[in-house]
Image: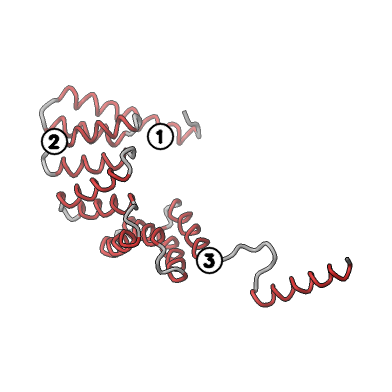
Amino acid sequence: MRRTGQILAILVIITVSLTGLSPGAPIKNAKYYYDQGADFLKKGQNAQAVAKFDQAIQMDPKYALAYNLRGVAYYRSGYFNRAMIDLNKAIDLNKNLEIAYNYRGLIYAKKNNHSKAIAEYNKAIKLNPKRAVNYNNRGMAYYRSKAYDKAITDFSKAIQLNPNFAVAYQNRAKAYFKKKDYSKGKEDRRRAESLESQKAFQQISGSKK
C-alpha cells in the first residue's frame, strides 16, 4: 500500500510538471474564458469581456455563445459594425440565439432601419415569447415608424410580462401622447416615475421588494 501511494505521488508530480497545473487548478479551456468574459460583461467591463471572449474563440473557433456575447460587448462599447459581424457569426453557428437577434435589431434601430429591426425582434420573440425587453424594443421600432397602435400593443405586452418595467410604461406614454390620448399618457408617465423612484430608493437603502 505504501509503495502504491508513492507511485501515485510520483505520477501526480509528473502530471504537474508536464501540464503546469497544480492539483485542483481550473482547466483553462474555451468555457473557462467564456465564463470569465460573461462575468466581466455583467459588471459592465466590456473591454475585459472582449479580451476573454477572444481567448475563448481562439481555443474554439465555433463557439457560438462566445461570438454572441462578444457582439453584445462590442455593441455596449459603441462598436456597432464589429458587433454585427460577431452576431452574424453567432447566428451562423446557432440559429436559436435569441439575444443575437435582439441585438441585431438594436443595431438596425441605431441605423434608423426600423423595418429590419422589427424583423430581427420578430425572430427573437419567436424564440422567446416571454421576454419583455423584446416586445419593448419592437415597440420602439414601431413607434419610430409612427405605427403607434402596434407600438402600444407591444409596450402593453412588455408590461404584462414585467409589471415593473418602467421603461415600457414611459415608452407607452409617448405613444399615447402621439395619439393625443393624454389621460392614458399621463397615467403611464406617473407609473413610470413611481417605479423609477422605488428603484432609486431600493438602491439607496439596499432593500428589495
Q: Which residue type carries mark 3? A: Asn
- Foreground mark, 2 or 3, reads 3
Residue named by callout 1: 200
Looking at the image, is mark 3 or mark 1 earlier in the sequence?
A: 3
What residue appears at the point 50 percent right and 59 percent down from the top-left corner? Answer: 36
Task: Give the amino acid at mark 2.
Answer: Tyr
Q: Quadrant of residue 68?
A: bottom left
Question: In this rendering, would 62 be left or right of 132?
Answer: right
Q: Secondary structure at mark 2?
A: helix
Q: Residue under circle 2?
A: 148
Picture layout, residue 128 above or below residue 69: above
Query: 67 and 96: which one is in front?
Result: 96
Q: Residue at x 31, y 57 (%)?
A: 75
**What whole-number distance in Å separates the C-alpha atoms at marks 1 and 2?**
30 Å
Cα gap from disc 2 to disc 3, whole angstroms? 49 Å
Residue 67 x/y as whole percent? 37, 62
Of residue 186 and residue 132, the one placed in the foreground of this image is 132
Residue 50: image x %, image y %?
Answer: 41, 63
**Of helix, strand and loop, which one carries label 1?**
helix
**Residue beneath label 3, please?**
29
- In front: mark 3 or mark 1? 3
Tell me the amino acid under the disc marked 1.
Answer: Ala
Which label's residue is closer to the chain start, 2 or 3? 3
Label 3, secondary structure: give it. loop
Q: Which mark is residue 5?
A: none
